[in-house]
Amino acid sequence: MKTIKFVLLLALALTSTHMFAQGKSVAEVLRADTNLKSQNMYVIERIIPDLGNWSTEDLKSASITSCSVLKKMGPKITWLHSYVTGDKMYCVYLAENADLVKEHAEKGGFPVNSVAKVSTVIDPTTSGETF
């Protein structure tokens, strides 16, 4: 299952690169994938003191824990990526509902300070300008 998710996300990334070159937004790319159409995007804020000073090994360990939980939960939730700052982490997930995001955090032992459903995604292609 882990390999399948990796291949799916790699294919999505490659497709995304091609679609972005055609002026498509992130939302359009995600909605074009039939496997992801039933899922919503969520941004999770996690307050973790001194997170910005975690070692590569600490971050790897957290990633391994997250992936292990995701593997057990099945295809109804997907972790896309996270942004690490000084004392916060902002994680982007695709899931059928916010409860799955909270369940993942509980099972992985991760804090959840807020969960926000993304209503739309904008990026440079939203402007209609060519760069």
Image: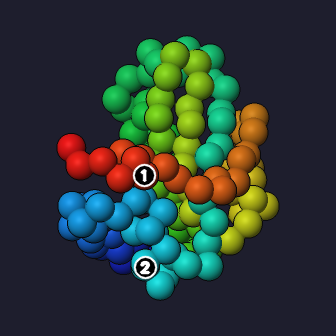
Give the residue type at disc 1: Thr
The extreme right residue here reads: 99
Tell me if I can see residue 77 in this picture.
yes
Q: Nearer the viewer, mark 2 or mark 1?
A: 1
Along the line of sight, which residue is nearer the eye, 38 or 8? 38
Q: Is residue 22 above or below residue 42?
A: below
Circle 2 Cα neighbour tier, 10 Å, few/some/many (<14 / 14–19 / ≥20): few
Residue at position x 42%, y 59% in the image: 26
Whole-percent x and y of residue 17?
Answer: 23, 61
**Quadrant position of residue 91:** top right
Residue at position x 46%, y 55% in the image: 80
Along the line of sight, which residue is nearer the eye, 51 or 91? 91
Mark 1 lies on residue: 126
Q: Is residue 78 above or below residue 121?
A: below
The extreme bottom residue here reads: 34
Quadrant where the C terminus is found in the figure: top left
Whole-percent x and y of residue 114?
Answer: 75, 39
Q: Secondary structure at mark 1?
A: helix
Q: Secondary structure at mark 2?
A: loop
Along the line of sight, which residue is nearer the eye, 77 or 121? 121
Give the residue type at disc 2: Asp
